[in-house]
Image (tube, rainbow, N blue to C red):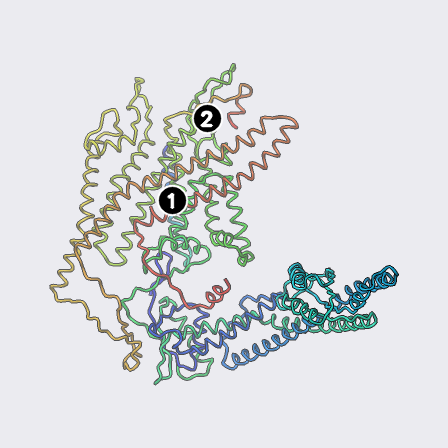
Amino acid sequence: MGGLLIVFVFAVVVALSSASYLFTPRGPNQTVIRTALIMTLVSCFLMWSITYLAQLHPLMRPRHSKIRPHNPTEHVTF
Amino acid sequence: MTESTFFRSEEMSLIQLYIPAEVAQPAVSELGELGLVQFRDLNPDVNAFQRAFVTEIRRFDEMERQLRFFTSQIEKAEIPIRHSHSTPYLTRARSRQELDDLEERLSEHENRLLQMNNSYETMQRRFLELTEQKHVLRETHDIFEDAAIHQEDARRSFDEPSAPLLDDLETGAGLQLGNVTGVIPRSKMQTFERILWRSLRGNLYMNTAEIEEPVIDPSTDVIVEKNVFIIFAHGREILAKIRKIAESLGATLYPVDASPDRRREALSDVMRHIEEFNSVLANTTQTRRQELMRISENLNAWMTIVKKEKATYHTMNHFNYDINRKCLIAEGWCPTNEISTIQTALRGVTERAGSTAPTILNELRTHREPPTYHKTNKFTAGFQAIVDAYGMARYREVNPGLFTVISFPFLFAVMFGDVGHGILVLLGALYLVMNERKLAHVDGEMFQMVYGGRYIILLMGAFSIFTGMMYNDIFSRALPWFQTGWVFNVPEDYDGKTVIVAEPNGHTYPFGIDYAWHGTENYLLFTNSYKMKMSVVLGVIHMSFGICMVYYNAKFFRKPIDIIGGFIPQLLFMQVLFGYLVIMIVYKWTVDWFEHDAAGYPVRNTPPSLLNTMIYMFLSPGSVNENDKLYPGQGFIQGLLVFIAFICIPWMLFLKPYYLKHEHNNARSKGYHQPSENHVRISTDSTHSDDIGGAVVADDVEHEEEFEFSEELIHQVIHTIDFCLGCISNTASYLRLWALSLAHAQLSEVLWTMTLGMAWSFTGFVGTFLTIVMFSVWFSLTIFILVGMEGLSAFLHALRLHWVEFNNKFYQGTGYAFEPFSFVAVLSQKDA
């Protein structure tokens, strides 16, 4: 997948945002619902993509020294 | 007429109402029910005592006083008051006749109650006297009996032959002792004794006894402990003196006859009286209680009526009275969209009253700044309150409350990210939301504050769950939901001490941070870099969004100079400096810095530090050290960006003031002048002929301010400096997201290892016991410190980011709130 996942999710977010812009029922709360939905999508996408990007080409690797000698695999997965 | 949205405040109109005098009261009270008009005071120079409806207000004040008196009496009698929440019966305007009836009824009730209270008090006083007398008779009885025996003894001793003659004579006379009996408060006993002893030089015989049951003083309702005393002395003067002293010390005297028969008679007499009084008192209490019960049934309804009527007349005092046409003239603000609602309501009043003269509503044109009215619902009210606490929006300016609905809980959650803590917050808020009707009337300032923000807390909890998933933290533990990207190759003969470095296996953790990082040595190093960069990215986007709102404001208020001289250079400045930083952050992430070519040589240099890149961008613009290069052509681009940033500063500084000066000079050369000040208030001018048809122009009190170039320039200099420095310091300010989220994660990690982690290192019975104890410690600390205190701190930081970093980019907040005349507000305000 790699970096393409971000592009894909971005497309999904754009699609969902436009859907929520277009299909929010008319009424006194239309603006609030629209804005809330789109901002939720955008902020969650931002945070997810930043987290994903930060691990895409890691500059450091996890270092462990407290692994127990016995059945180490069990510990690794917590 | 535009549709009302939460993006801008409601459109307001200044309206003028001509209300015929005979329907004035029902019409105004109908408007009070609607709660849509904020009336202006048309007689600001008239003081409160000279207004038209002072007598009516006095009358309602008197009725309110009576009702308060009833309330206090009912509370004293501990009768429950029936709470009726806005029955339709109450929403009807009262006729004059009904109000007169009510007034009469209240006075009647009050008189009856006062009378009953009076007679009750007299009776109680008499009852008290009787009780005291009873005690005096009982206690003195013993003393007299004693004395009788002693007298016998004395007689006998006198009869002895060895007794001296003189003594016999003197004591014989002394046998004719007079007595003073009565009751005195116990606290005064000592003083009483001392004064008697001193003034009579010890020529008395005194005996006292304590009354065991406490006596209640009917006038003050205080329990007083009292003593019965009896004093024997001889000589009329001395007895009179004793009486005087006793009375001056607050004693009550009850004469007791020396003969035992009469005493017995008196006692039985008193006892009979007490019996009688007891039944009478019980009767009186019963009737009084019944009266109060009858009052308590209607008390709330009456209170509501009186308060509403009082508020109605109070509002009518703000109107002008046109004597010629027998009508009241009112002026006030109302939402433009609601004018038809108001008109329908007023027409209904006229029809119901059977009046022929209609109420006339005019829309006035004015240059006054209308009040700001954001139509909120129970969901948005809390968020709008956050914005209003910073400053009330200018009329129709972009309302940051709309964006706060999501950005506030999101930024909170960035600092508070933990699935477990998020669930706790969400559950708490869900409880409040589910039971919102039941909890709406719970008192307590703290509770009401939390209750008012229940939807904010709900979203805060929901977003915290999401950010917790991103951080992969649930009570500081990890959630291994997806395929990890790291493998720890632990050798067979591992000694448990050497450091093992994980190998990548080609996967990238798809949702949140890889759980393999949890508990590693360099976990903090990794999250540190990740969270710092994330807070800068989020901050720059948030602030740029705020700058974009400048555009919407300028477009709406038709001030193109604010776009050309404000919005464009500001956004450019921000993007050139910090937008570029964000791009560099993202770019650095997207590049595989350890890529090797076919020959096995590294393709790129070592990853450069972004901080140094930013610093050297200014220190040596146009050139980049070969080892610190991010991308080809970096030197040129950075040089260009710095150049643009420096262009932006004079652009922001000078364009707007010089443009305004140009405009001003243009206007002046065309011959426009300031309008003269001697306008007549049309609404006060009742002889004005054409004010019924069409729109009427109300005067402007505030004129446009005199244009002063130097002032404008100074203002712009301050604004520019504020913005440029603000860009830097505000970006730095968003780093609080980084600091707080790190602190939160570390604190919950430490709490876990210190309590549960410690308990689980034991086995057997000790382990079980410790686990139970430590779990309760861990859970309560989680609730109070991690969710309570940390939550509060994250809340305050999110608040600051909105008030300062976001709002100062575009929000003026110089308006004033729309406060309509509404019975709901009147009733809730006075209850407090």
Foreground of the two, B138 or B231: B231
Foreground of the two, B36 or B102: B102
Q: In the displayed image of the protein, which residue is found farthest to the front? A: B165
Name the element at disc 2: loop
Instruction: Please tell me the numbered disc located at residue B520.
Output: 2
Residue at x 34%, y 85% (from the top left corner) = B324
Quadrant in the picture for residue B165: bottom right
Horizontal placement of B517 versus B534: left or right?
right
Horizontal placement of B252 versus B339: left or right?
right
Residue under label 1, please give it: A42
B605 shown above or below A30: above
Expressed as whole percent of the image width and height from the top left, the position of residue B281 reads 71, 72
Comparing labels 2 and 1, the label whose residue is closer to the camera: 2
Would you call the spot at circle 2 few (<14 residues within 10 Å), some (14-19), or many (20 or more)? many
Name the element at disc 1: helix
Q: In the displayed image of the protein, which residue is found farthest to the left? A: B669
Residue B232 seen: yes
Expressed as whole percent of the image width and height from the top left, the position of residue B743 reads 44, 35
The amino acid at mark 2 is Thr
The amino acid at mark 1 is Val
Instruction: Please tell me the numbered disc located at residue B213.
Output: none
Residue at x 26%, y 68% (from the top left corner) = B701
Expressed as whole percent of the image width and height from the top left, the position of residue B584 reads 29, 34
Tell me whether circle 2 and circle 1 mark residues in contact (CB < 8 Å): no
B691 shown above or below B541: below
Horizontal placement of B744 versus B283: left or right?
left
Residue at x 29%, y 74% (from the top left corner) = B695
Residue B79 seen: no
Would you call the spot at circle 1 few (<14 residues within 10 Å), some (14-19), or many (20 or more)? some
Q: Are marks 2 and 1 on the same chain?
A: no
Quadrant in the picture for residue B12: bottom left
